[in-house]
Image (spheres, rainbow, N blue to C red):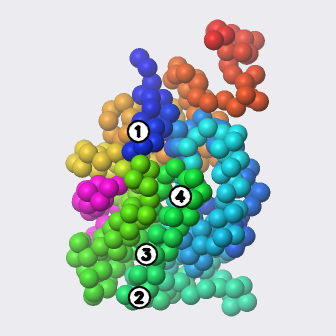
Amino acid sequence: MASVLFSPIDLRGLTLPNRIAVSPMCQYSAADGSATDWHLAHLGQLSMSGAGLLISEAIAVERRGRITHGCLGLYSDDNEDALARVIAFCNRHGQTPFGVQLAHSGRKGSVHHPWNGGKGLAPDEDPWETISSTTEGYDDWPAPKMADAAELARLKDAFVQATARSDRLGVELIEFHNAHGYLGNVFLSPLVNNRNDRYGGSFENRIRFPLETFEAMRKAWPADKPMGVRIPGSDWVEDGGWNVEDAVKYAGALKEAGADYVVVSSGGVVPQQRIKVGPSYQVGFAAEVKARTGITTMAVGMITEPKQAEEIIESGKADMVALARSFLYNPRWAWHAAEALGAETPYYPPQYLRAKPETWPHVFPGRARK
Ligand SMILES: Cc1cc2nc3c(=O)[nH]c(=O)nc-3n(C[C@H](O)[C@H](O)[C@H](O)COP(=O)(O)O)c2cc1C
């Protein structure tokens, strides 16, 4: 039977050649938000990986929306020019549609690179004041300023401006980041959002800021280009946190507002979370959201094996899978998955054609030349 993982899927006006997405992965290698040669090499190789979709790391829509000094941004003309160079390379040498994840770190910013400990920047390390829905800091990270009405308008506008820049860059898809404890997620979570205005308290109030921001971005994005949202499936606390029921309701509201897909992730809101990590550990969230809202759904988290990915799609638990660490470990994951599932091999750049199994009979004796 033909592989469903390697069947195409339409997201609005964009047809993806298969259902494998490279999940966003921060590289902490930018210079004041601008992409560097690292991004050229990293995203460049992934653009020729045979994946059906390549989504950039979280890109901060304003300078203080970065996590570290090394995070990518799209808040200046320099940022835009630097990313244009990377995208031009990917489009010239690769074939995977290029999407960006637009994000704001909220209260999880102004910190060191993770490999330098990830703690708050010292006064002589050019720290910045973070902004969030609350004045409470995450763990011992810097405490944020609470966003007032004027700040909320500014933040929304920053997302709209970055959306317009993404369109100018020829980006084909936007993913709006509402998970992992960053700005959007902190509005959503009842554990952290203790505002007493129309953006806090009830479920409807807590989803209002991210939903309004999504609507404003959607208006600024061409009607034929897809836009999705990374939403949380759980806060992973015993009592009182965001849960899959909330994810279903929020996904329904996003669908109505014109979202083309949701990718259901989780965690990162409060340090006392207890995540039960294991193979496919977040797939159940995606399945629930898909079954109850009908929105196109991407599953993410510890999906590492071709048969596992195939089963997730084939059983209807999700429409796509997003893989992160598997693509760092093996940028050719999609080639190997196609081989394992007996599917037509996805894109090979012509420079690499001599490594196609059917052209290499002494290593792959059963494979005929096509
Ligand atoms: C190095 C690294 C950086 C990440 N950066 C981001 C990011 O920028 N945005 C995001 O939504 N998730 C980010 N993630 C989470 C991944 O996209 C993914 O959800 C998570 O790693 C689980 O998938 P996996 O088991 O396939 O790695 C990152 C993960 C890794 C390993």
Of pointers 3 and 4, the one earlier in the residue sequence: 3
Highlighted magenta segment, given as a residue range: 234-259
Of pointers 3 and 2, the one earlier in the residue sequence: 2
Q: How many neighbours does mark 3 have within 10 angstroms: few (below 14), some (14-19), or many (20 or more)?
A: some
Q: Amino acid at mark 1?
A: Asp
Checking the image for residue 156, the label placed there is 3
Q: Amino acid at mark 3?
A: Lys
Q: Which residue is mark 4?
A: 167
Q: Amino acid at mark 4?
A: Asp
| Image x and y of residue 162, in percent | 53, 67
Which quarter of the picture shows residue 197?
bottom left
Q: How many neighbours does mark 4 have within 10 angstroms: few (below 14), some (14-19), or many (20 or more)?
A: some
Residue 52: tell me if it is visible: yes
Checking the image for residue 10, the label placed there is 1
Q: How many neighbours does mark 2 have within 10 angstroms: few (below 14), some (14-19), or many (20 or more)?
A: few
The magenta stretch spans residue 146: no
